[in-house]
């Protein structure tokens, strides 16, 4: 390059060096970003894999198909077929006898007891009782039923109990393993989809436990929370944002709403305990109270989300309406709220999803009770899905572990669907201007 | 030397010999101000106690276009918003003084700003059609004021307004489509149609062409020219050329003062005040 | 006057003024030259004056072009607009004065061919007044001097008075000796030319007044030219 040619300072070697440095810096930032995303995805993946890995087996359960004889002499000696008698009858004996006749060579008491432990004692007896109670004509007949095996047998067959461990360290005896293997070989013991997990309520026996009660309880509480927090929250937000005078009082209220959103959820539980249970005397463990507490907890989230959605609406739209002679209220409800609707809905659904996953406040108001009935009204005692998970995770038996994971999977699926609904509604309602 | 009766061109000199100067300008401006729409007396506007407008006295004529010009922050937009009480919507804004519209104080106790705004329409800087259909945009005003009891009436109002805004031919086949899908110039004319639909007497325009390209601006100016026959129009503009093209009267604002208010031609050829002169000719004041 | 925010606008406007001032100086030269040629009976000078008028026309074209470009590119308003339009008008007036100088030079050829006339001092006095007026009006322009412009505007009366005197003299001259008719009749045209120079200078003064004040000078201008109605009775 001759001395006369004018070189731009941006074309010198130093400049090119600086450019390379700058690019390297940008690349480092990009790689750091990618690394962060990869780590986050890996964590999430790990969580999902471990949950599904532990939990999926809970959706299958081993069942024993067995023929039982419903002797009239055992069940209804007077032949009255009276409901009370049929309910009280000894169905345990029916199952035991069916098992003993299946394995006639078991004669000693210990062997018999051990044999009976193969099936779920209360599961099998309740099942037969239910059948007879509903159809008394079955008495005196011989029927084939499919009953759940005991959780130990189930765990053994799922491979969660090590066959090779010394017998005294294992919950299943060598003899029981032998019987089970025989039954499996003959096709009497099979693995089926565990509908009971989705339709039954909580139980002391893991093989009988289901999440239906908790799901219904959660749904009821959530319904109450939604009905309470969305209208009140949206109303409060619209009022505060659009109509309230701007003064120290409203500033104070605004600060407190923001603070409220940061209050730990257990504090709301204490509030519910003090106000709803002790002061108003509402029933303990009821979804009504749970919903009210969750609703209160969600209220600040919804108010904040609604206010920011309202604030995001272009003021020029409101100006346009006002300049046409719309009143302030008309401008707000004809234009501002509809335009903010997608944001309000998203905020509400995310608030609801948060409430769905909340455990602590429900513990405080007693929704931690052991409930074996699916609640039919919001005043009845009920459990909730996250509380159920909390309770199961605390139990010792190996079978609870897989059920805990399975319940978490169900909870996550519900949460994901709620978020999906939020996304869908947002894209449907969102309008551009 | 007796022939003093003619001037050097040989014309009779009678007109000048009378000694009377006939001021043509004075007569025309007298005709313009024959009917006053707004009589502003000592109008002041305060934002949070800070005075943004310092005692403006101005008579806005009933017909024609009055332009408000001045540098940013001079109070012209603030003044414009006085006429439809849009300042009421700004917290901590206060208006003092008297603005008489056809003799009635529009800040009087008996005047509802909602009804005032039906009489005094407004068009904003950024086209702001509602995110609704073209039809619903224009129909919104008549609906909230109950001007069209039957669907048929509403159709008529919408068609008439769009026609008057020079938009009908462009949108008549797509009234159901969103107003936000139109081009900027069309949106601005849609907004004017929306304002016209309420049958206002006055249309305020706050820099209506600042977001438009020259062609759309020309169409808008043509529209303003047509509308001035029927409506009293006040327009705030940053473009002096635009003020010169569309208005008959021009008011120059500077630092919250109304510096000069005169016929547009006088303002742009021979402003009386040095500040006006400097602003118009692009000088450092 | 404050400066424009866009300084190149100032440059363009001051260039336009300088060009006008240059044109004014050239036109004055032409006028002086034409008078000199007449007085000294210098045919070559007269010829040169006639030729030089092309330069005046060229400057006029140049100014027209500048004005056009200012109007198109700068959209001048208020004082700028008045100044631009005035420049166009002043250039036109100067160009006319230039034409009158050329015409005077042309007539001086015929006059030089004739016998010299006696008692022509008045017309040269008149000529110097005309030159002075052109000088003054261009000074008023250069210094943006309203007072001076008004002075020039009033001074036109003086020329008109001279014109009346000269006209009467020439008429008498022709009546006394009709061999003078050729020269005298040309001389009347020269006198008329000088009187027109005064009118054009007055127009320039009016333009200057309008630029500086935005107002027209009162229309009732004193008019001293009575030649159109002058008769000599013997």
Image (cartoon, coloured by chain):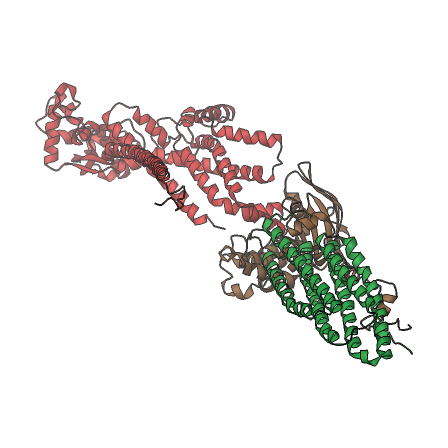
State whether residue B238 appears in this view: no
Between A378 and A417, which is closer to the camera in this rendering?
A: A417
Colour brown maps to chain = B
Residue lying at 65% horizontally and 52% vertically, measured from the top left: B281
Q: Residue furthest top?
A: A168
Furthest-left residue in view? Answer: A105
Does residue B202 appear left or right of residue B214 in this picture? right
Q: Taking A389 as reference, is A171 left or right?
A: left
Asked which quadrant contains residue A373, the reply is: top left
Q: Position of residue A326 (x, y in %)?
A: 62, 50
Q: Which quadrant of the rendered structure holds the C terminus of chain B?
A: top right
Question: Front-most of A365 and C126?
Answer: C126
Q: Colour of chain C?
A: green
Say how many tags the image has. 0
User: Where residue B43 sits in the image (x, y, percent)?
Assistant: 74, 45
- Farthest bottom residue in view: C178
Q: Looking at the rendering, in which quadrant would you find the N terminus of chain B?
A: bottom right
Q: Quadrant of residue A405?
A: top left
- In percent of the image, x 46 and y 45: which residue is there? A342
Q: Is residue A118 left or right of residue A11?
A: left
Percent x, y of residue C58: 61, 65
- Determine whether C21 is above or below A399 in the image: below
**Residue at x-position 59% and y-position 51%:** C8
Q: Colour of chain A?
A: red
Residue A323 visible, this angle: yes
C28 versus A70 height, above or below: below
Q: Nearer the viewer, residue C154 or A278?
A: C154
Q: Position of residue A113 (x, y in %)?
A: 16, 23
């Amino acid at each position: 390059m001759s001395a006369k040619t004018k070189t731009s300072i941006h074309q010198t070697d130093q400049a090119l060096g600086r450019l390379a440095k700058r690019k390297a810096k940008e690349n480092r930032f990009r790689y750091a970003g990618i690394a962060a995303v990869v780590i986050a995805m890996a964590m999430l993946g790990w969580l999902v894999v471990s949950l599904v890995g532990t939990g999926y087996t809970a959706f299958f359960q081993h069942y024993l198909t067995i023929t039982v004889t419903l002797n009239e002499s055992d069940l209804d000696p007077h032949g009255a077929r009276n409901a009370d008698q049929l309910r009280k009858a000894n169905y345990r004996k029916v199952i035991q006898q069916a098992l003993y006749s299946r394995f006639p060579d078991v004669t000693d008491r210990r062997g018999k007891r051990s044999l009976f432990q193969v099936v779920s004692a209360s599961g099998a007896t309740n099942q037969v009782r239910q059948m007879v109670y509903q159809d008394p004509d079955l008495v005196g007949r011989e029927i084939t039923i499919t009953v759940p095996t005991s959780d130990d047998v189930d765990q053994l067959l799922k491979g969660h109990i090590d066959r090779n461990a010394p017998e005294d360290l294992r919950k299943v005896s060598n003899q029981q393993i032998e019987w089970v293997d025989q039954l499996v070989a003959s096709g009497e013991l099979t693995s089926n989809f565990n509908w009971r997990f989705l339709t039954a309520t909580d139980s002391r026996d893991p093989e009988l436990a289901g999440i239906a009660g908790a799901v219904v309880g959660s749904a009821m509480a959530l319904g109450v929370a939604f009905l309470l927090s969305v209208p009140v929250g949206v109303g409060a937000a619209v009022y505060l944002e659009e109509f309230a005078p701007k003064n120290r009082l409203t500033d104070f209220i605004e600060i407190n709403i923001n603070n409220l959103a940061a209050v730990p959820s257990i504090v709301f539980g204490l509030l519910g305990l003090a106000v709803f249970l002790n002061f108003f005397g509402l029933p303990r463990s009821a979804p009504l109270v749970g919903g009210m507490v969750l609703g209160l907890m969600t209220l600040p989230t919804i108010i904040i989300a609604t206010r920011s959605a309202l604030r995001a609406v272009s003021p020029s739209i409101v100006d346009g309406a006002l300049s046409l002679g719309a009143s302030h209220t008309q401008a707000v409800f004809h234009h501002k709220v509809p335009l903010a609707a997608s944001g309000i809905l998203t905020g509400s659904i995310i608030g609801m999803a948060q409430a769905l996953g909340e455990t602590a406040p429900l513990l405080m108001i007693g929704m931690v009770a052991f409930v074996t009935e699916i609640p039919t009204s919001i005043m009845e005692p009920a459990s909730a899905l996250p509380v159920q998970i909390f309770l199961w995770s605390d139990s010792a038996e190996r079978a609870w572990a897989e059920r805990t994971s399975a319940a978490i999977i169900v909870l996550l699926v519900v949460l994901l669907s709620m978020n999906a609904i939020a996304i869908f509604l947002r894209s449907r309602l969102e309008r551009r201007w | 030397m007796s022939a003093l009766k003619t001037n050097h061109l040989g014309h009779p000199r009678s007109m000048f010999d009378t000694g009377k100067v006939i001021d043509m300008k004075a007569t025309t401006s007298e005709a313009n101000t024959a009917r006053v729409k707004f009589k502003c007396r000592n109008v002041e506007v305060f934002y949070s106690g800070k005075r943004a407008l310092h005692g403006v006295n101005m008579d806005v004529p009933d017909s024609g276009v009055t332009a408000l010009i001045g540098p940013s922050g001079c109070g012209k937009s603030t003044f414009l918003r006085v006429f439809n009480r849009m300042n009421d919507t700004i917290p901590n804004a206060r208006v003092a003084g008297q603005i008489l519209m056809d003799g009635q104080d529009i800040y009087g106790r008996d005047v509802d700003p909602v009804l005032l705004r039906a009489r005094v329409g407004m068009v904003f800087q950024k086209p702001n059609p509602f995110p609704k259909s073209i039809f619903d945009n224009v129909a919104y005003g008549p609906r909230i004021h109950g001007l069209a009891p039957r669907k048929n009436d509403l159709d008529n109002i919408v068609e008439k307004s769009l026609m008057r805004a020079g938009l009908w031919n462009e949108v008549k086949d797509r009234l159901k489509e969103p107003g936000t899908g139109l081009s900027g110039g069309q949106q601005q004319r849609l907004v004017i149609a929306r304002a016209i639909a309420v049958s206002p007497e006055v249309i305020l325009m706050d820099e209506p062409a600042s977001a438009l390209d020259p062609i759309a601006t020309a169409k808008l100016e043509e529209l303003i020219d047509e509308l001035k026959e029927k409506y009293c129009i006040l327009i705030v503009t940053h473009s002096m050329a635009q003020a010169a093209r569309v208005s008959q009267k021009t008011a120059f604002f500077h630092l919250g003062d109304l510096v000069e208010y005169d016929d547009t031609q006088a303002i742009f050829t021979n402003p009386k005040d040095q500040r006006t002169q400097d602003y118009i000719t692009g000088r450092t004041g | 006057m404050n400066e424009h925010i866009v300084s190149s606008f100032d440059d363009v406007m001051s260039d336009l003024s300088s060009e006008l001032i240059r044109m004014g100086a050239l036109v004055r030269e032409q006028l002086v030259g034409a008078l000199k040629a007449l007085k000294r009976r210098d045919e070559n000078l007269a010829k040169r004056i006639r030729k030089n008028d092309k330069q005046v026309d060229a400057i006029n074209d140049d100014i027209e072009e500048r004005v056009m470009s200012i109007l198109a590119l700068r959209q001048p308003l208020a004082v700028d607009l008045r100044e631009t339009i005035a420049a166009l008008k002043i250039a036109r007036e100067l160009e006319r004065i230039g034409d009158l100088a050329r015409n005077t030079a042309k007539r001086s050829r015929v006059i030089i061919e004739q016998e010299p006339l006696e008692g022509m001092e008045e017309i040269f006095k008149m000529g110097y007044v005309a030159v002075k007026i052109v000088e003054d009006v261009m000074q008023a322009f250069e210094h943006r001097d309203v007072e001076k412009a008004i002075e020039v505007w009033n001074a036109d009366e003086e020329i008109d008075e001279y014109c009346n005197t000269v006209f009467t003299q020439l008429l008498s001259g022709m009546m006394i000796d009709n061999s003078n008719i050729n020269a005298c009749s040309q001389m009347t045209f020269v006198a008329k030319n000088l009187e027109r120079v005064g009118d054009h200078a007055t127009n320039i003064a009016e333009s200057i007044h309008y630029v500086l004040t935005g107002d027209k000078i009162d229309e009732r201008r004193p008019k001293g030219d009575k030649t159109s109605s002058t008769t000599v009775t013997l």
